[in-house]
């Protein structure tokens, strides 16, 4: 008899966030590759356009719901199962049928995932509807989820203070995309993006918790006359980010702001960076830090519970101040030997994360349940 793990793949049909889409796809690929004997993986996806099929090689099948993603999310928030049914259900997000079920007799189990505690920690930076949905779904998870997955132990502690989940909180990390590497046409890609060579790289939006202002101040304090590239900016945020840079003392001629990039373009950008600066202290998995580590890019980061746990000795962790980050930048780029050493440390730490290992832990979790 075959045991089927059913994975919610709404992000592959109607993505709300590029990182959630990537996590859903990469985790599913890992689950398929690591499926134990007698087990397979099936997808559950909302109704969607014909030009956006769910394409993950090795899926035993994809069951489409009658509702599109937005309507499905609303139904699940109200506790309507939306015809999804039971069995072993794993969701890479909070979107899942969090309803009463019988794990003991029917072998039904539902596991959901939270990557970012922003809707609870910094609700003012999120749309009210998104905050309301996340909070409502967590309340449903407290009642009905068999486990809630978070990517770090520090986030597990925080979530435990927000919701009474007890031992149902499990830690399973994310990773850089499988095979993430600087492409052979990296120089050409950077030219197309109109980017210079040898720059300090930051990532984030103009929101205060992304701390770009602190990152710019650190670059200015270090006295680095280097280009500064920002990726992941929101739509129409370039003027606001330029204002933050100017206020910190980064010359306009040195600043290059780009929005969300595809995986290969992002890898090409990392390939041209001399260091990656991570000033944010958000309670969320730092996806770009994981990518910098995977590519062996020197990392200078503001110390935080999440950064301390993810980076460990793979980069320079200092106080979240312009003086401390600036001094660390100056030290990191002070010599070729320092750059090389930090690159080696980053690459060593980057090897600690893989989607295949994360998928194996998901299979183990469902087996324990």
Image (cartoon, helix red, strand yellow):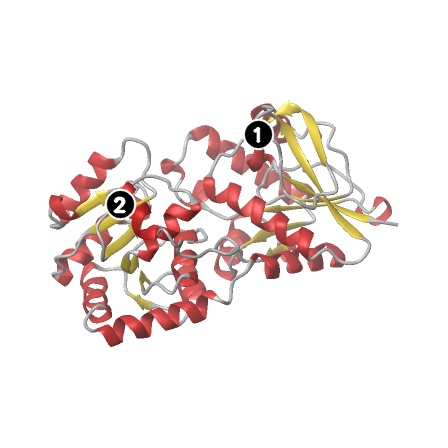
Residue 139 pos. (x, y %): 59, 39
Kindly identify which residue carries mark 1.
52
Please determine whether, in this image, residue 153 is positioned above or below residue 110.
below
- The first of marks 1 and 2 along the sequence is 1
**Local crowd size for mark 1, using a 10 Å CA cut-off: few (<14), some (14–19), many (≥20):** few
- Horizontal side, residue 245 vs residue 188: left or right: left
Q: Look at 32% across and 39% down and name the residue there.
A: 259
Seen from the viewer's position, the closer of residues 235 and 161 is 235
Seen from the viewer's position, the closer of residues 166 and 330 is 330
Residue 273 pos. (x, y %): 28, 57
Seen from the viewer's position, the closer of residues 133 and 310 is 310
Q: Look at 43% across and 59% down and name the residue there.
A: 306
Residue 203 pos. (x, y %): 32, 49
User: Looking at the image, can residue 278 be seen?
Assistant: no
From mark 1 to mark 2, how far is it between C-alphas?
Answer: 30 Å
Question: Where, quadrant-wise, is the C terminus in this rendering?
Answer: bottom right
Kindly identify which residue carries mark 2.
191
Where residue 361 sits, quadrant-wise, is: bottom right
């Amino acid at each position: 008899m075959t045991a089927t793990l059913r994975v919610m793949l709404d992000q592959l049909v109607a993505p709300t966030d590029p990182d959630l889409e990537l996590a859903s796809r990469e985790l599913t690929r890992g689950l398929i590759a690591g499926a134990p004997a007698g087990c397979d993986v099936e997808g559950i996806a909302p109704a969607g356009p014909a030009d956006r099929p769910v394409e993950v090689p090795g899926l035993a099948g994809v069951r489409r719901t009658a509702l599109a993603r937005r309507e499905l999310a609303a139904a699940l928030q109200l506790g309507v199962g939306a015809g999804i049914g039971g069995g072993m259900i794993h969701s890479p997000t909070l979107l899942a049928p969090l309803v009463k079920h019988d794990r003991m007799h029917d072998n039904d189990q539902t596991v959901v995932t939270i990557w970012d505690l922003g809707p609870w920690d910094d609700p003012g930076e999120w749309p009210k509807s998104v905050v309301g949905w996340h909070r409502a779904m967590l309340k449903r998870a407290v009642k009905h989820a068999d486990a809630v997955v978070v990517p770090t132990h520090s986030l597990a502690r925080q979530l435990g203070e927000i919701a009474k989940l007890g031992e149902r909180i499990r830690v399973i990390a994310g990773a850089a995309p499988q095979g993430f590497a600087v492409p052979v046409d990296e120089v050409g890609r950077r030219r197309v993006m109109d980017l210079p060579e040898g720059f300090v790289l930051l990532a984030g939006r103009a929101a205060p918790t992304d701390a770009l202002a602190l990152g710019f101040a650190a670059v200015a304090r270090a006295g680095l006359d280097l280009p500064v590239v920002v990726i992941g900016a929101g739509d129409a945020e370039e003027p606001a980010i330029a204002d933050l840079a100017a206020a910190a003392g980064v010359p306009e001629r040195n600043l290059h702001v780009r929005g969300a990039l595809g995986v290969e373009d992002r890898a090409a950008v990392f390939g041209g960076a001399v260091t990656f600066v991570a000033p944010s202290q958000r309670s969320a998995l730092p996806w770009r830090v994981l990518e910098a580590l995977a590519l062996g890019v020197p990392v200078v980061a503001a110390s935080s519970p999440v950064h301390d746990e993810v980076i460990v000795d793979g980069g320079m962790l200092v106080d979240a101040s312009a003086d401390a980050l600036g001094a660390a930048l100056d030290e990191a780029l002070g010599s070729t030997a320092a750059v090389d050493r930090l690159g080696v440390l980053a690459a060593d730490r980057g090897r600690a994360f893989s989607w295949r290992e994360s998928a194996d832990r998901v299979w183990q979790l469902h087996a324990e349940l």
